[in-house]
Image (cartoon, rainbow, N blue to C red):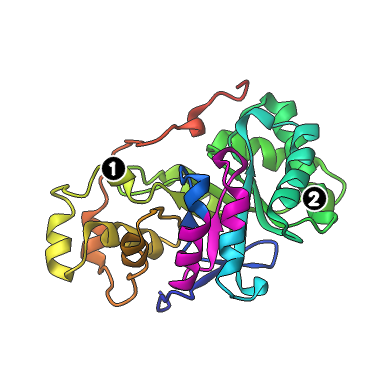
């Protein structure tokens, strides 16, 4: 494993780089989003993960830019909301995101959930492919896709006349942590060089006192949240911790002065399936 640092990046299928450490703004109130995002960027983060349903795209993007870092070094993500998974709605969604953020392009645009039925999902994907062709978006992907959803998309891509029409699946953003390691989805994505982004990597603070983490906290002199985030990085995931507390934002990036050894990583293999958030990965294809 190459040495990880706050500047570590992963190469997307699109050819663009994605920072391995992201700053999530889920449930961040719009009134706070600008200042906390600026703080995150000034603290060393270069990647902001937003979504239309978060209702904070504009202040998050403004906060990101306000830190004074060149746009070319920053990475901004948004998502087509679950209720808009269709061709027409997704096209409008991308244009609206560009309008409200004032950005010239969006680095990564995802389908937020595998809803809308087959026609809706594939239509929305086609809209994202066209957004890439138009220069509005650089990379595209999905979120909360289970293997059956991914295989549906892959089959459609293989049926297209060209790779350009099929589009490049760069990312699948799903809930990932030691209590939800999702080996089936992870294996499918890694075999195809699809980058996995881990949301809720801190298990919504429900595991901070978990007996599984205590020996590692003691061994490494780190907090339980830092142990969990380091686990995600060493798994090869992009991690998306979220916090509106400046000291926590800083704590969540202090991940590069220790390493979990093979025994540590093995101890975090729980084998359980315990989501702390919603779980659309198991939704039927008809959903």
Task: Identify residue for label 2.
Answer: 131
Residue stretch rendered in magenta on the structure: 34-61
- Image quadrant of residue 217? bottom left
Relative depth, front residue between 120 and 98: 98
Task: Identify residue for label 1.
Answer: 271
Residue 36 located within the stretch drawn in magenta: yes
Determine the main secondary structure of the stretch shown in magenta.
Answer: helix
Drawn side of residue 133 relative to residue 96, left or right? right
Relative depth, front residue between 1 and 22: 22
The crowding category of the residue bearing disc 1, from other C-alpha atoms within 10 Å (few below 14, some 14 to 19, many at least 20), is few
Mark with earlier residue (2, 1): 2
Residue 230 lies, in percent from the top left, at 33, 64
Q: Residue at x 28, y 46 (%)?
A: 205
- Residue 251 in the image: above or below residue 144: below
The crowding category of the residue bearing disc 2, from other C-alpha atoms within 10 Å (few below 14, some 14 to 19, many at least 20), is many
Drawn side of residue 1 relative to residue 133, left or right? left
How many numbered badges does the structure rendering display? 2
- Image quadrant of residue 133? bottom right
Residue 192 located within the stretch drawn in magenta: no
- Residue 220 in the image: above or below residue 210: below
């Amino acid at each position: 494993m190459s040495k990880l640092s706050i500047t570590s990046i992963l190469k997307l299928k699109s050819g663009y780089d994605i920072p391995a450490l992201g700053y999530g703004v889920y449930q961040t109130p719009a009134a706070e989003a600008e200042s906390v995002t600026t703080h995150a960027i000034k603290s060393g983060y270069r990647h902001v993960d937003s979504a239309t349903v978060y209702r904070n795209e504009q202040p998050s993007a403004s906060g990101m830019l306000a830190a004074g870092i060149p746009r070319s070094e920053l990475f901004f993500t948004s998502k087509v909301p679950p209720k808009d998974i269709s061709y027409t709605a997704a096209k409008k969604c991308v244009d609206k995101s560009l309008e409200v953020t004032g950005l010239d392009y969006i680095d990564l645009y995802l389908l937020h959930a595998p809803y809308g039925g087959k026609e809706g999902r594939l239509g929305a994907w086609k809209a994202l492919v066209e957004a890439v062709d138009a220069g509005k978006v650089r990379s595209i992907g999905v979120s909360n896709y289970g293997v059956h959803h991914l295989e549906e998309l892959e089959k459609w891509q293989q049926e297209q006349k060209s790779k350009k029409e099929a589009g490049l699946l760069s990312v699948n953003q799903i809930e990932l942590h030691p209590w939800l390691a999702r080996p089936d989805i992870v294996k499918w994505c890694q075999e195809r060089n699809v980058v996995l982004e881990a949301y809720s990597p801190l298990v919504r603070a429900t595991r901070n006192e978990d007996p599984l983490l205590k020996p590692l906290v003691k061994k490494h002199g780190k907090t339980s949240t830092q142990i969990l985030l380091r686990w995600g990085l060493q798994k090869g995931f992009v991690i998306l911790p979220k916090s509106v507390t400046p000291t926590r934002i800083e704590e969540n990036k202090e991940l590069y002065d220790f390493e979990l050894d093979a025994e540590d990583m093995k101890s975090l293999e729980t084998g359980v399936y315990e989501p702390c958030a919603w779980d659309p990965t198991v939704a039927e294809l008809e959903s």
